[in-house]
Amino acid sequence: MQLIDIGLNLTHDSFDRDRDAVWQRARDAGVRQAILTGASREHSPKALELALTRPGEWFATAGVHPHHATEYTAECDAEMRALHAHPQVVAVGECGLDYFRDFSPRPAQRSAFEQQLQIAADTQKPLFLHQRDAHADFMAMMKNFEGRIGPAVVHCFTGTREELFDYLDQDWHIGITGWLCDERRGQHLRELVKSIPARRLMVETDAPYLLPRTLKPMPKDRRNEPAFLPHIVEELARDRGEAPATTAANATAASAAFFRLPA
């Protein structure tokens, strides 16, 4: 099983003590490449810095998550554009809207999202998207850029059937995480994942967050790792009624093509 983790927060300080060991465990588990998420003005350059240490294995996104939207100034926009000049930065984001937490005012979220959509239009790089409880505004803003942006993935999909089919109708990709394994919040995904076409489905851990609740044994520190991606794939395959090797091969092919990764 050869896998690509499309959402790994490897800049998180919980990995500072053993980052190389974390990746070795992931490699041993069959994870051959990872997209390191850049989600703030601080962590986007760190994601690129890390990616440059393992060319061909690690790649980065550069963007500002809606939680950090208030930091999206003109200077921040210039910094993001400079990061996107690097070929190792393969997607714009994590960007989007989050009305569930509302850590940033909604007008600031929409402004930051719009500016990053413009970067995607200018660079033609794929979009790495976040949406929570903001579906109507999210779709409206994406529609404003219709025909001007390239491929998009709604990362860490946790939404409704209506949301899923709205995304699929736009031919966007869907990222599935260990949320699938959460019997409290993710049970509805067990049925929905059957409807995602193989060429639109990708897998991710969102580590160190979203530790799969069905993982056994559980790590004592409750930290999620990219080495746990095969567990998510096995759960996903069972729900889709296919062999894990099939799910893995299709997700890896879709991810490599989406992010334009080298073989």
Image (spheres, helix red, strand yellow):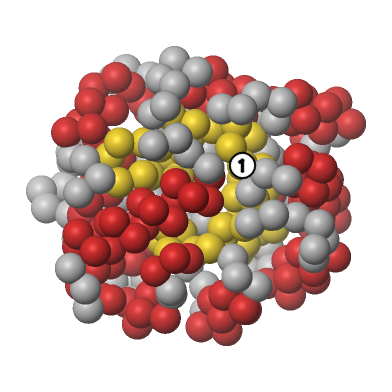
Residue 223 visible from this viewpoint: no
Relative to 58, 211 lies left or right: left
The residue lying at 58 percent from left, 37 percent from top is 90
Question: On the image, numbered disc 1 is attached to which residue?
Answer: 91
Quadrant in the rendering for residue 249: bottom left
Q: Secondary structure at mark 1?
A: strand
Q: Residue at x 82, y 42 (%)?
A: 122
Residue 193 to residue 205: above or below: below
Quarter containing the C terminus: top left
User: Percent position (x, y) of residue 118?
Assistant: 83, 47
**58, above or below 147, in the image:** above
Q: Quadrant of residue 70?
A: top right
Q: Residue at x 54, y 18 (%)?
A: 49
For image coordinates 53% across by 51% down, the residue present is: 258
> Mark 1 Cα within 10 Å, few/some/many (few <14, many 20+)?
many
Tell which residue pokes out farthest to the left in this image. 217
Vertical placement of 121 versus 49: above or below? below
Q: Is residue 55 left or right of residue 165?
A: left
Image check: 118 left or right of 35? right
| Camera-nearest residue between 247 and 138 | 247
Question: Where residue 98 sits: x, y (%)?
Answer: 66, 58
Tell me, yes or no, if residue 98 can be seen here.
yes
Say above or below: 237 vs 28.
below
Figure label count: 1
Q: Position of residue 50 (x, y in %)?
A: 48, 20
The answer to which of 231 and 200 lies nearer the viewer is: 200
Q: Position of residue 38 (x, y in %)?
A: 58, 35
Q: Amino acid at mark 1?
A: Ala
State the residue lying farthest toward the right.
Answer: 74
